[in-house]
Image (cartoon, grey):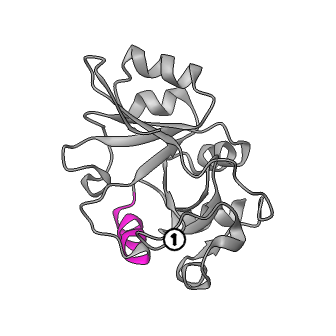
């Protein structure tokens, strides 16, 4: 774990298991690392990425959380990413064109421990090239992607995700809701 943290703190990128699929991650506050992920994925810079947080406190440090969001987080059985308005302290390169950001409060123990030790939110984007199928297990990740990141986590390599992604729901500060992905 300490090796992973050092890689992330020095602007590196990792492959890691999330509460859904395998992801490519970096320190969400490090713009150079974020740009590396855009390059690795061959992803257009105008397509935002989501971030993961491990605690309600960190979520509240980044965004004003509407009451409806808490209800959805509490009631959802499937991992849920919520798109919030007006995030604080995040690079603009991570944000959608309207200035919003997708954030998932993780339940996965490995991710919680990783984010807690890093003490910063973590970028999470599928471990594939833009437009390719998302990897449900480590062996689904292309060798080319593995070679492009700085480190591939050993944890849960044999595990197959039961989710091909999270639900994505946009919630405005006035509690309006729009389901973007079920």
Q: Is residue 157 above or below residue 123?
A: below
Q: Tell me if residue 172 comes above or below residue 15 in the rendering.
A: above
Q: Is residue 10 above or below residue 177?
A: below
- Rendered location of residue 91, percent (x, y): 30, 53
Residue furthest to the right in view is 158
Residue 88 located within the stretch drawn in magenta: no
From which residue to which does the magenta span run?
30-40
Left or right, residue 78 beside residue 70 = right
At mark 1, the secondary structure is loop
Quadrant of the rendered structure where residue 4 is? bottom right
Give the residue drawn at x 58%, y 37%: 79
Query: How far from the left and from the top, in percent, is residue 73?
Result: 53, 25
Q: Which residue occupies the foreground of this view, 13 or 176?
A: 176
**Picture residue at 28% right of the left edge, 20% below the top:** 176
Q: Nearer the viewer, residue 33 or 21?
A: 21
Q: Position of residue 97 (x, y in %)?
A: 19, 50
Please tell me which residue is depicted at 70% across the width and 61% down the height of the picture: 2
Q: Which residue is mark 1?
A: 128
Q: Residues within 10 Å of mark 1 (few under 14, many from 20)?
A: many
């Amino acid at each position: 774990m300490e090796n992973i943290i050092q890689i992330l703190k020095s602007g590196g990128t990792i492959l890691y298991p999330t509460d859904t699929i395998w992801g490519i991650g970096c320190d969400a506050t490090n713009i150079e690392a974020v740009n590396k992920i855009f390059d690795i994925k061959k992803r257009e810079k105008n397509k935002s990425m989501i971030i993961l947080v491990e605690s309600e406190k960190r979520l509240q440090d980044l965004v004003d959380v509407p009451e409806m969001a808490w209800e959805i987080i509490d009631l959802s059985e499937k991992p849920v990413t919520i798109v919030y308005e007006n995030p604080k302290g995040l690079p603009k390169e991570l944000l959608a064109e309207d200035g919003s950001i997708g954030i998932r409060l993780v339940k996965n123990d490995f991710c919680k421990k990783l984010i807690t030790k890093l003490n910063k939110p973590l970028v999470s984007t599928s471990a594939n090239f833009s437009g390719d199928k998302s990897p449900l297990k480590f062996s689904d990740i292309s060798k080319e992607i593995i070679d492009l990141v700085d480190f591939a986590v050993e944890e849960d390599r044999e595990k197959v995700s039961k989710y091909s992604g999270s639900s994505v729901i946009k919630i405005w500060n006035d509690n309006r809701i729009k389901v973007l992905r079920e």
